[in-house]
Image (cartoon, grey):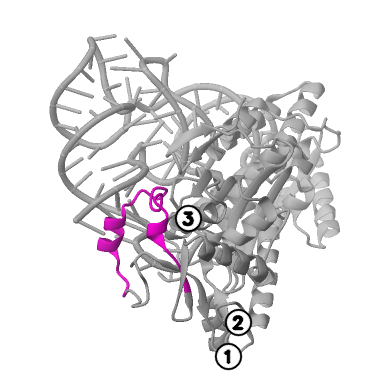
Amino acid sequence: MPLALHNTATRRKEIFEPIDPTNVRMYVCGSTVYAPPHMGNARPLIVFDVLFRLLRHRYGERHVRYVRNITDIDDKINAAAKANGESIRDLTERTARAFHEDVAALNCLTPTVEPRATEHIGPIIKMIETLIASHHAYFAEGHVLFSVVSDPDYGKFSGRSRDEMIAGARVDVAPYKRDPGDFVLWKPSPPDLPGWDSPWGRGRPGWHIECSAMSEVHLGDTFDIHGGGLDLIFPHHENEIAQSTCAHGGKPFARYWVHNAFVEFGGEKMAKSVGNVRTIREVLTEVPGEVARYAMLMSHYRDPFDWTEERTAQARHALDRFYRALRDVEDFTAPENVFPVTVMQALEDDLNTPLALTALHAILGALNQAIDRHEKLRLKGQLLAAGTVLGFLQQDPETWLKGAGDEAAEIETLIQQRLAARKDKNFTEADRIRTELAIRGILLEDKPGGKTEWRRAV
RNA sequence: GGCCGGAUGGCAGAGUGGCUAUGCAGAGGACUGCAAAUCCUCGUACAGCGGUUCGAUUCCGCUUCCGGCCUCCA
């Protein structure tokens, strides 16, 4: 079954065909490291992690190259460092470290390359020089600006005409711009802010050119997939396309553009500027990363949804059910790499993760009903294999259900006491023990064969 | 103002021109000493109004409402 992706460039679902199946290339706009990432930031991280895993599954782990940049040059970074009274370097390092911890907790694989803007000043300058030489950019009052009129295709990607952009412009236009739509490639930096020597004096790059230069370095002029949040379509991705195609003599830039919708909180877009963010860190204090991940994948990536406690509760409940079923077949080894067709087809259809989860539930139901040992093995293998693509169900079920506490021995003792009481038909005592444990958050399940399992309530 | 994208049962959430997913919650049942877990059964929902059609939740138009972009933004 082919892989279909919704391509923002054409506004249609298209069959994905890589330029080179032995080198499938994807670029995703990553994080600007000035503040702790929130669940809205987490969405593309998780969505494109699933796509990365799916591509690896289809084309082989060694044949997929996933580049996710870190923006460590930015006005917001400068402002935040100043406000914190810390150095810019300290701020970006500290934030990047926390970012990596958060992303790892969400079970996201490490991208093939995580380029930083500060490490690509050379290529950025080179690309700007190319654009100036080909009259797509000009120098004015210490700035280098991209000339929008020099690119007849400018605006096509995001579907807006130049007139519209001018009419809609809400920002004061800098007097040195030849056209109100022109955007900065390089701007001067005062001595107290980060800056690099360039043919245009000491300065720093604009945001858009960073991504154009980094994708060029790590993926080449033309590559397969470019991802990011919907809000990046304009101006960021429109500008990237303009810069890259103009710098590369008209060669196409990314072939498939994939954009995720927003996470909302209280009915509107979760954003720092709105002030309604739940940081990944906050969420992780309440639920395991795997639950947050599951909750994220309950909706299709192109649909917005509200981040609520009900949602994470439902995600946790679902994962508990999966792990409970896996625990019951823990003692036998399942075959590996038996990917269930239903789940894979859902994912291959434009990453339909909700449908994939439905398919996963069907397998769960079948596993719970299965009597035949062989059948159980097969279904367990399917759950685990699907879990490698979705990025969950890879933990030890016992650990998931019981937690890391050190009271296991004591609980076992109480369970044995209860079993003895039950054997003596002393149900009062048996129920007393069960209640005692329940108060401590320990739930008991009497299994057939006289065995009693326990797990931690949530 | 311009341009996108949505509106599905109590909640979450797929999908389809006719056979009406799935999960949670709820009701009943099986199992259990009782529970829990698990299994079985149960809900004819697709914003409104027109149109196309033998037939529309699914296609088209309009209306209403919601979210987003047009400025930093995942």
Q: Determine which of the numbered discs, if any, sits on residue A361 in the image.
A: none
Along the line of sight, the residue nearer the viewer: A341 or B18: A341
- Amino acid under label 2? Gly
Q: Which residues are magenta?
A: A144-172
Q: Quadrant of the N terminus of chain A?
A: top right
Indicate left or right for A358 with A176 as reference: right
- Confirm or deny contact between disc 2 and disc 1 (CB under 8 A): yes
Q: Is residue A235 visible?
A: yes
Residue pointed to by mark 3 = A242
- Amino acid under label 3? Ala
Q: Residues within 10 Å of mark 1 (few under 14, many from 20)?
A: few
CA distance separating discs 3 and 1: 31 Å
Residue pointed to by mark 1 = A191
> Which structural element holds mark 1?
loop
Chain identity of mark 3 = A
- Amino acid under label 1? Pro
Chain identity of mark 2 = A
**Residue at 42%, 48% in the rendered image:** A157
CA distance separating discs 2 and 1: 8 Å
Query: In the rendering, at what x and y percent does residue A332 appear?
Result: 86, 33
Query: In the rendering, at what x and y percent does residue A454 appear?
Result: 75, 48
Chain identity of mark 1 = A
CA distance separating discs 2 and 3: 25 Å
Indicate left or right for A144 with A371 as reference: left
User: Which callout, 2 or 3, points at the residue further toward the start of the chain?
Assistant: 2
Residue pointed to by mark 2 = A195
